[in-house]
Amino acid sequence: MNRKQLNIGLFGFGCVGYGLYQVLKETPGLKTTIKTIVVKHPGKARAISPGHFSYDRNAILDDPEINVVVELIDDADAAFEIVSRALKNGKAVVTANKKMIAEHFDELLRLQRAYDVPLLYEAACCASIPIIRNLEEYYNNDMLQSIEGIVNGSTNYILDKTSEEHLSYSEALTLAQEKGYAESDPTLDTKGFDAKYKLTILLAHAFGLSVDPSDIVHIGIDRIGELELAYAREKNMKIKLIAHASKNAAGNISAYVLPKFVPEGHKFSSVDGVFNGVIAQTSFADTQFFVGRGAGAYPTASAVLSDLSALTYDYRYEYKKLTGNEQLEHNEHILLKVFFRHDKDVKPAYGHYFDSIEESYTNANHAYVTGYISLKNLAELYRNDEGHSFIQLDHAARIDTKKTKKEESAYAIIE
């Protein structure tokens, strides 16, 4: 098969944009040329000469010679305008903007079909791990039961430092910012939004379920305190931010992002620093474990490069699971076993949220309970008070025996 020549219009020349520029220089056999690079700020110093740049998006979007747009900017709203216009103009698109994809997934899918052009976004999830292509292609005829992963390198780095070097959360966050792993405003990562956007995308390719990201419960790592860190060390565990999706007994999908205690010896316990890891659980092939760098210029650029290589063969996502006959729904009716750190004087305020409580602890400064709580109640309790935190315990949850048999079918056993 003859490979297609790609004439690229590149939006953005930050860390990943420059990484892609360098990577393409080292892969001459790919038959790609960056014709135009559009950036926002004319006066900003860059690693290549100003003659490479334009400051008008139309220089790319209205150029008939450019057949591929690569979007690598950090503004999700502006990215959607660029990507949607590129698709309408018949140009293939490669993007790494997970927020933009998650918030506009259905519209972007419609545009791909209406204008018969591909949109690829492997770099939007887990950087160097080719997880989207695997979920889209390899598991198409397999009965995938669950996926869960460490999908945010910044939070993983922070949690690694609290575990291995006994830094406080605030100390580890400052270090991550100094090294460039976290932004000056790190809340997109630390509050779990980034992981939620990635999970939204993975749901579509793993199970064929399109979900508004606002419907996915997400709790980040920003409330983790010394009590949780001490508990993890005492129990020989680490804390990891995990994005989880699973199919329950009724065939519906439960999805959430939560910090989780991971025991020593678990696959995720060895995923440290800015690395990401994903575990896929299937009915017939047991489990597969993917691991790779989840942040940085070259790991992310390598995923963009993979998409560009695929485009030279006219590859596109087929979204077979989205168009299949199985009608799946998003389901919050699950029970999770959690560690709940709270103010020692607020017990009456939280007791009715829990299905059952197994352990309580209080001293002069701290208090926590462990027990089972529904995902819906967990989200409500988390919203109502900023002085506490939740961390999922690595034990199997149970079906709520207080429910009717009809209601029980909607509940899942979640680890």
Image (tube, rainbow, N blue to C red):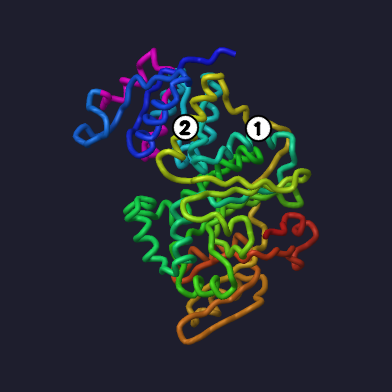
Q: Quadrant of the C terminus?
A: bottom right
Q: Residue at x 22, y 36 (%)?
A: 45
Q: Secondary structure at mark 2?
A: helix
Q: Label 1, on which residue?
A: 137
Q: Quadrant of the N terminus?
A: top right
Residue 261 against residue 55 in the figure, above or below? below
Q: Residues within 10 Å of mark 2 (few under 14, many from 20)?
A: many
- Magenta includes 64? yes
Which of 10 and 402 lies nearest the eye of the viewer? 10
Q: Residue at x 29, y 31 (%)?
A: 39
Q: Amino acid at mark 2?
A: Val
Q: CA distance from mark 2 to mark 1?
A: 18 Å
Name the quadrant containing residue 176: bottom left
Residue 350 against residue 326 in the figure, above or below? below
Q: Is residue 114 left or right of residue 157?
A: right
Q: Residue at x 36, y 59 (%)?
A: 175
Which of 412 and 182 lies nearest the eye of the viewer? 182
- Magenta includes 249? no
Disc assigned to residue 181: none
Q: Is residue 401 left or right of residue 94?
A: right
Q: Label 2, on which residue?
A: 304
Q: Secondary structure at mark 1?
A: helix
Name the quadrant containing residue 136: top right
- Residue 50 picture location, percent across and down: 22, 27
Name the quadrant containing residue 339: bottom right
- The region drawn magenta spans 52-81
